[in-house]
Image (cartoon, rainbow, N blue to C red):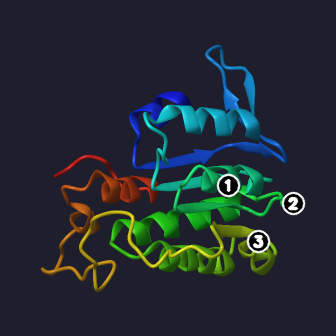
Amino acid sequence: RLQATTTKCCGCLHFSGHGHPESLVFEDDRGGLHWLGVDQLKSLISNGVKGGGAPFKFVFVSACYSGLAGQTFVSAGVKHVVCCQQESQLMDSAALAFTRAFYLALAIGRTVKDSFEIGKQAVNASPSVPNSEEEMKKFVLLPLDGNHNVPVFDAKPVSEWPRKLGAAGASRRSLYRSKSSFISYFNIAEGGSSTQD
């Protein structure tokens, strides 16, 4: 799947899984483990694009020990990479809190830098993340000297979230009625229904 995603030059890539200091763990076609080393990852990325260049404008590597994998994407020309510090294990609860807040911010038109900071603050404020202040420091935005003051998604900024209900008695679900399946995802992830009235 990674090879197909790279070949198609999808705009963004999100990997959520297990990491090792020198590899990421994928699933093979029989449901077993497939260890993909950073050298293999680099080769896969560089061969995926006809004429070279970065296959993605944004990558999120949500895995323990993913700093080296993140640097591999940066070396391939990806302008915005979120990953974990190379020497750190990442708690699932921290990854979940960060990811929800980060993608919501991106979806409503915030910059990568702002979304990253919002994600870190969500980890710090989460009651389900032990040692939250230390956990939030594990997230890294690469390249460290990159210009991340740009949005990834072409979205109009939302001045207030969630939007106030227009009519008395309107259902919460009406907040999420949108052409954007991305925002609908957050409704489902928060325990809402995927059906429309």
Q: Position of residue 80 (x, y in %)?
A: 53, 63
Q: What secondary structure is found at the residue carrying circle 2? A: loop
Mark closer to the observer (2, 3)? 2
* Three-letter code for the amino acid on which mark 1 is drawn: Gly
Asked if residue 15 lies left or right of residue 38, the reply is: left
Q: Tell me the crowding category of disc 3: few under 14, some 14 to 19, or many 20 or more residues within 10 angstroms, Cα based.
A: many
Q: What secondary structure is found at the residue carrying circle 3? A: helix
Gap between marks 2 and 3 measured at Cα: 13 Å
Q: Tell me the crowding category of disc 2: few under 14, some 14 to 19, or many 20 or more residues within 10 angstroms, Cα based.
A: some
* Three-letter code for the amino acid on which mark 2 is drawn: Glu
- Asked whether the viewer can see residue 24, the reply is no
Residues tagged 2 and 3 counted as in contact (Cβ below 8 A): no
Residue 15, labelled with which disc?
A: none
- Asked whether the viewer can see residue 141, the reply is yes
* Three-letter code for the amino acid on which mark 3 is drawn: Glu
Q: State which quadrant residue 95 falls in.
A: bottom right
Q: Which residue corresponds to mark 1?
A: 70
Mark closer to the observer (1, 2)? 1
Asked if residue 86 lies left or right of residue 96, the reply is: right
Mark toward the start of the polypeptide (2 vs 3): 2
- Nearest to the observer: residue 65 or residue 183: 65
Q: Which residue corresponds to mark 2?
A: 87
Q: State which quadrant residue 41 falls in.
A: top right
Count of labels in the image: 3
Q: What secondary structure is found at the residue carrying circle 1? A: helix
Q: Position of residue 184 (x, y in %)?
A: 31, 55
Mark toward the start of the polypeptide (1 vs 2): 1
> At x 51% / y 63%, what residue is drawn?
100
> At x 51% / y 70%, what residue is drawn?
101
Q: Which residue corresponds to mark 3?
A: 135
Q: Which residue is most to the left?
A: 167
> At x 68% / y 68%, what residue is drawn?
140
